[in-house]
Image: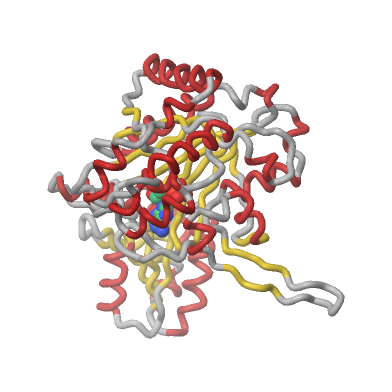
Amino acid sequence: MFARYGFGEIRTPIFEDTQLFARGVGEETDIVSKEMYTWEDRARAQSEKAQSLTLRPENTAGVVRAYIEHKLGERGDLQKLFYIGPQFRRERPQRGRYRQFWQIGVEVLGPVSSGAESPVRDAEVLEMLATLLDELGIKGWRLELNSVGSSDDRKRYNAALREALAPVKSQMCEDNQRRAETNPLRVLDSKDPHDQDIINALPKIADFLDDASRAHFAAVLSALDACGVAYTVNPRLVRGLDYYTRTTFEFTVPDGSGLGTQNALLGGGRYDGLSEMLGGPKAPGIGFAIGEDRLILTLQAQAAAQALDVRTPNLEPSKLDAYIAPIGVERNAAALALARELRRAGLSVEVGDGTFRLKKSFEAADKLARHIVILGEDELATDTATVKIFATGQQVKVAMAALGGHLKTI
Ligand code: AMP
């Protein structure tokens, strides 16, 4: 799918300099303030200082770091990159939320002249996600999006939020009282049932967007309309990372999709100032990260809900072409040599062990493979193999020279 949309893979290191995340993701965020796995790396020489390193809690900062370090911007074109890999956050583990989890993500970024800032890019990324989820067979997904404007818009909005929260925050839960002080935007994420009326009455970011951000968001929405991608604008969607600007979004799945309370399948947004925040050139961009664990939980739960066996033929690993059963340890080496020959001819093969009794070999072979190839004294003497086809129960003697062809065709 990523290839069809012109993306290439990028692999960044599992850990990076702690400062990258502190500056990129933001000191005030939950990720940086509470959830990172950070350690002091030993200095190699006395003259060297120890370096603080961190297991990556997300991958956007690492990709932008690589973009800057390897001067990808100087190529002048749009960089369309995808990654798949583990991320680490010290969260409270529960269903769909782990301390090591996998993300599948993309980043689209480049110099302004490459069109990286264009609303076309936002709409393309969202349309690609809609197609991906449809092609995977995820049912009932919902796209919610919002614009958080420029960093100036956000400053003004933050000030307005603080002002609106000041007289009411004492009626809110402890978490929200703290957020109202440290990072008022986070109050909007709160699910606390008692605080919802207060939160819904707070000022909306849409009223603080400058003309350029407003026009950008309108263009994203009209491109989505043109592609027929359904969405809901959620004015409370601000997301937990500081680098977001303008478009932010989340795809959720309905209750009962196997995620419990963690119903966000993926999230993302635009980060037009991130490269400059990290000391790089201006490189607007947009990206997302899918929680791969959650994607799989959802596929399994939705398949089960349809009373389908999740191990439909599609998902069941296909059987090997052959299981070679040497009779007696003296035949082990010959079995390995035969496996090598068959594998080189493109067949998938497993080798048993000469100490196994025939019954055990048959059981193991039946689980793994379509055929069992028995290699005993007689067979080796006559340069043949005894082959049983599990599907038909048929057992035949085949000349060694013809074995590969026989296994492939039946
Ligand atoms: P974020 O990087 O916080 O924007 O998260 C993007 C997506 O990653 C979320 O929508 C989840 O699907 C997934 N995700 C985030 N944190 C976790 C976690 N601790 N365990 C499993 N999946 C996660």
Q: Is residue 194 above or below residue 56?
A: above
Q: Residue at x 41, y 64 (%)?
A: 91
Confirm whether residue 377 shows in the render.
Answer: no
**Position in image of residue 344 (x %, y %):** 54, 56
The furthest residue to the right: 47
Number of residue marks: 0
61 with respect to 184 (left or right): right
- 339 or 138: nearer the eye? 138
Horizontal arrangement in the rendering, residue 343 relative to residue 378 (left or right): right
Q: Nearer the viewer, residue 281 or 3?
A: 281
- The vertical placement of 54 against 105, above or below, is below
In this orientation, does residue 320 appear?
yes
Asked if residue 290 lies left or right of residue 410, the reply is right
Q: Residue at x 50, y 44 (%)?
A: 105
The residue at 30%/56% (across/down) is 173
Residue 154's x, y, as percent? 52, 35
The image's colour scheme reads secondary structure
In the rendered view, does 77 fall on the left or right side of 218? right
Decide: is 295 above or below 331: above
Q: What is the x, y in percent for residue 184? A: 44, 46
Q: On screen, 40 above or below 320?
A: below
- The residue shown at (34%, 55%) is 317
In terms of depth relative to the viewer, which is nearer, 309 or 211?
211
Q: Nearer the viewer, residue 184 or 132?
A: 184
